Image: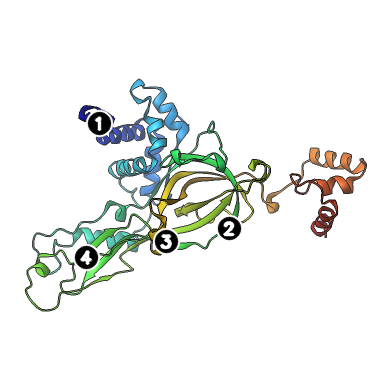
Amino acid sequence: ADLGLMATNPDYKAEKEKCASFFRSFPSSTGDGFKYLDMLQEIADRQRETLVIDLSDLAEHCGSDNALQTFQEDVQSNTRRYISLFSQCADELMPERSYGAVEEDSFDVLTRQREQAGPDGETGEDVPRVLPEILKRRFRVFFKPGGKAATRTIRSIKAAEIGHLVTFKGICTRVGDVKPLLEVACFTCDGCDFEVYQEVLGDSFNPVSKCPSSYCNSRRGGAQPQLFLETRASKFIKYQEVKVQEISEDVPVGHIPRSLTIQVKGDLTRSMGPGDVVSITGIFLPKPFTGFKAMHAGLVANTYVEAMAVTQCKTRYSDFTVSSEDMKKLKQHRKGADIYGRLAQSIAPEIFGHADIKKALLLCFAA
């Protein structure tokens, strides 16, 4: 039984090497250089803030090597872990910034001062300042669906897809404000000025309450020094919450439309508006209840999707243009019989009858 368990456990060191091999070997579309190494150079030169991995590129890379037959399926079934692996590989392969590409900003200066600082604020003893990699990282990894990716309905996403990468289509019903989300919290000790960094992995966290420096640990008696959150030294990202509902043609007759909560982070924020029909690729994840609700929820958890890619399926009204073929069809319909009734029937076609109400709505739209 132990041997069977060991056989199913993945070797993430080998998986990380596969990620690094993909970055180093996948060629660019022009034929000169490598696509993802060029992206890393643009990130180093502050020309982009996202590392978008195309799943069709991953499929092409896996098809050329028999040892990578299951790699793409592993990425799509355990996406959260592979985002971390790809991010670590990108950190290791990150090239030096091009000379004169961009001047240093406050983030670069603050990071350099942190790395050059001594181990301990005042005493210089053996407690190191541990800087999380995510604090120094200036990019986010996203997965982009390939051209042959099948678009599913919200109703077809089941509990078996927890942790998987899913692509579905829906209409935005509610779009929240863009807010800052804490990723790395920085605390400063008022007794020794030692900085403590804590990575925030969920919606809530327990702040560090004790300073780990040797100076504070060696103190005996008296009030213990306190840790204060340093907002300027902490890392925040853009965060937005969107509610997406399945479109009317995907709802069976007599059923209520289902909806999903979408968490949008980084550069994907403000990519959707109310009423937009969008195709979303993201990670289907559970969200346990907290506080008083957790007492009654038991083992039941809510679900949400962490967005990786957003594609608009319907042209915005401001971008809409009428082609010559569309004008010919409109003229043909204009000559047809009962154009007023046909236009009214096109409103909510899944609802039978109510012709007078539909005609009244049509007049409201036309006005």
| Percent of width and height locating residue 84 | 33, 44
Image position of 16 (left or right of 170): left
Distance of mark 4 from mark 1, alpha carbons? 41 Å
Q: Amino acid at mark 4?
A: Glu
| Front position among marks 3 and 2 | 3
Pointer 3 residue: 293
Kindly check if marks 4 and 1 are in contact, taking CB atoms under 8 A apart as contact.
Answer: no
Q: What SS does tag 3 mark?
A: helix
Q: Quadrant of residue 283?
A: top left
Q: Earlier in the sequence, mark 3 or mark 4?
A: 4
Q: Residue at x 31, y 53 (%)?
A: 134
Label annotation for residue 195: 4
Above or below 220: residue 82: above
| Front position among marks 2 and 4 | 2
Above or below 154: residue 263: below
Kindly check if marks 3 and 4 are in contact, taking CB atoms under 8 A apart as contact.
Answer: no
Pointer 1 residue: 5
Pointer 2 residue: 174
| Percent of width and height locating residue 298 | 38, 54
| Percent of width and height locating residue 360 | 83, 57
Distance of mark 1 from mark 3, alpha carbons? 36 Å
Image quarter in which the N terminus is found: top left
| Front position among marks 2 and 1 | 1
Distance of mark 2 from mark 4, alpha carbons? 40 Å
Q: Amino acid at mark 3?
A: Lys
